[in-house]
Image (spheres, rainbow, N blue to C red):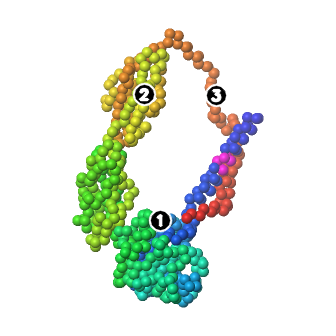
Amino acid sequence: MKAIFESKFRFYQQILLAGATIFIALLASQSVAQAAPTTLAPGDLVIVTVASDTNFASGSPCASQNSFDFVPLVDIGSGTTIHFADKAWNGSTNDWRSGGEGKVTYVAPTDISAGTVIRYEDCFINTMPSVWTMDGIPSGSSGNFDPSTSGDNILVFQGDEANPDFIYGIGWARTASWVSSGTPTTNTSYIPPALSTAASTIVDLGARDNYQLQCSLFDPASSSFLANVANSGNWLGDNTTIFPVITETCPQVTVNQVAGQNDPTNVDSAIFEVVFSKPIDPTTFNASDITLSGTSGTVTTGPLQAGPMDDTTFQFTVTGMSAEDTVVASLGVAVVQDTGGNDNSPSTSVDNQVTYDPEAPVITFTTPLTPGATDKDTFTVTITDFLPDATTYVYVLTTSPCGVSTDFSAAEPLVSGASIDIVGDSDNGKYVCVRAEDQPGNISYSRSANPIQVVLSSNPSEEEPQSESEPEVIGQETLAETGIENYDVLLGVMLVFGSLLIYLITPKLSTAKVK
């Protein structure tokens, strides 16, 4: 009776544990939800394109309209709200200028990675109403967002417009967009608190209607990017042409090892592929434009066009690498031009490096066999290599030479630095043959200096007689033997489903705020 009780106790204990595990796993899965809305600090966002040539027209197509591109320099969570106002700040009253004008508001529809270019165009108010909205300042007033060709500013802020947290400011379309005295107009503004030209959070471009940062300088990951954007000399201006999204203006470029490239490799040849986002002028691209880092290697072939043969895709080969070397390939900024004369942006990569290792593993018998050892002999092998692959280390006992022709079909695994015992004298006369292969495929063989020569002691101990009793088998009971009935199983299943029901009616866990 006691045994049956204990069996049932263990059974229900396991059922409850399974239910708890499922419940915890389901709750944990909620923790991978989208990040919380992000609070931005001054300089966490920049504007890289502005246009004021066309008035806002509700319902009009997206061509030739007021527009701007902004780029967050930090990751922002889904639901992050950012306001862009073309209304001036009055430093005399420390408030918004009285009168019309307004703001557009962006609500991140999902998590946005740092460096992502986000464009606003007037028609997005109608085509993307869950992302972009327009309103006056104060909210509900008749003003709207409509940058003027006679000069205007965009002030970026979060929070309540009555107490805004300013993030960034840009002015253009007149000689001086920012003022420090008098009354601001619809074309000028004071610099709000927390922003300054010294901190590169205020930009003053000039008198053109439309501007864009030189796309060759578009490198949001660079530590100097904020300062580069704030330098008006790094912008292009035009009075009639509205610039496309900045990443569409200059050739963006990726450099990666070509598909099928062995990495690591023991062959002195690494092939890379360069892909431009738009056709380039092939005469502007040559081997000297490619930057190689590492201890050695030169471009010996290419760059040569590859499929689809439309001036976007090229390949080149690097050789002359030294032993145990990693070569990294990239393209710097403004080394290649497209057919319109636009310089390329600096290259990005997923995998732009190849490791070269022509050296085979070094096998050393650190504890050699000892001829005449009593009852057993012991050996230890140490294997060293630049790119080791310990899963390939094996040994066999053989009287044949040790090398490529050795039969390793019945080989035993070997761990570098671990001792291995050879017991008895049945293998006397054989040698230990070790085989090791590294990641690039270099293979080494090594044979022990001495053969196995084990001497059995004169009075070997007799083996203990085998017990004739049947061994106890644990865990093989049937349900009937354990006393667990069908209703026990049914109740166990109900407990598991009960844990799922509790999960479904439990409020979802809120995610942590992520900036």
**Residue 472 has which mark?**
3
Query: In the image, is 384 to the left or to the right of 499?
Result: left
Quarter residue 221 falls in: bottom left
Q: Residue furthest top?
A: 458
Name the one closer to the observer, 296 or 143.
296
**Mark 2 highlights which residue?**
366
Looking at the image, tell me whether mark 2 or mark 3 is earlier in sequence order: 2
Element type at marker 3?
loop
Report the magenta residues as a range.
15-20
**Residue shown at the point (51%, 86%) measured from the top left:** 181
Q: Position of residue 141 (x, y in %)?
A: 57, 87
Quarter residue 446 falls in: top left
Question: Mark 2 to mark 3: distance in Å?
Answer: 44 Å
Element type at marker 2?
strand
Question: Mark 1 to mark 3: distance in Å?
Answer: 63 Å
**Residue 453 has which mark?**
none
Q: Could one spot residue 293 in this view of the protein?
A: yes
Name the one closer to the observer, 484 or 379.
379
Q: Is 79 situated above or below 477?
A: below
**Residue shown at the point (35%, 48%) measured from the top left:** 326
**Mark 1 highlights which residue?**
114
Looking at the image, tell me whether mark 1 or mark 2 is earlier in sequence order: 1
| Residue 19 is a magenta residue | yes
Three-letter amino acid code at disc 2?
Thr
Query: In the image, is 178 to the left or to the right of 300?
Result: right
